[in-house]
Image: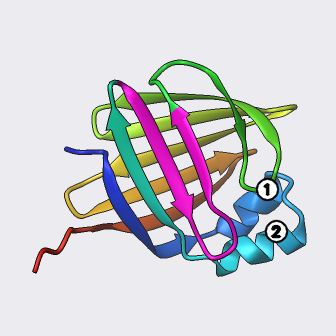
Amino acid sequence: MSITGKFEMIKSENFDDYLKAAGVNIAKRAAAAAAKPTIEITEEDGVYTLKTMSIFKNTTISFKLGEEFDEETADGRQCKTTILKDGNKLIQNQKIDPDEATTIREFSDDEMKATFTTKDVTATRVYKRVRNSFY
């Protein structure tokens, strides 16, 4: 099962409550709720790049599995992040003082399901895998 590819969001549940629990202000939560992000994941020589693109903000993180790195969240907070791979899942752990957040991205042939958790609040976003079309 490939975890690389391009994915477009098709469904979002409880994301505003998750962002509220994470401490994101109302203006940034409103922008996030309106966005329909596209995610692109690539890998080269053991370095993964995860790009999140939306009409409001684009973010990019590059990482090696299991190695902690500094990350700036989409809303500007600084955190220490570690990403692991477990079968068809990428598990992202963020330490955002004094809290922690976990994102589990589960991949299938047709989609990626992202589950976000912080402070016992969980949100889910589903993305369809975009197939390359050749004419």
Q: CA distance from mark 2 to mark 1?
A: 7 Å
Tell me the residue at 75%/75% (across/down). 31
Which element is circle 2 on?
helix
Where residue 4 sits: x, y (%)? 31, 47
Quadrant assignment for the C terminus: bottom left
Is the N terminus in the top left, top right, bottom left or bottom right quadrant? top left
Residue at 63%, 76% in the rendered image = 55
User: Closest to the observer: 100 or 47?
Assistant: 47
Vertical placement of residue 76 versus 130, above or below = above
Residue 60 against residue 82 in the figure, above or below: below
Q: Residue at x 64, y 68 (%)?
A: 14
How many residues crowd around disc 1 within 10 Å: few (fewer than 14), some, or many (20 or more)? some
Name above or below for residue 129 compared with residue 83: below
Amino acid type for the residue under numbered disc 1: Asp
* Residue 109 coordinates in the image, percent (x, y): 19, 57
Q: Is residue 110 left or right of residue 30?
A: left
The answer to if 60 sits in the magenta stretch is: yes
Q: Which residues are magenta?
A: 46-62
- Which residue lies under the disc numbered 1? 75
Q: Residue lying furthest top in this view?
A: 67
Q: Earlier in the sequence, mark 2 or mark 1?
A: 2
Q: Which residue is mark 2?
A: 28
Type of amino acid under label 2: Lys
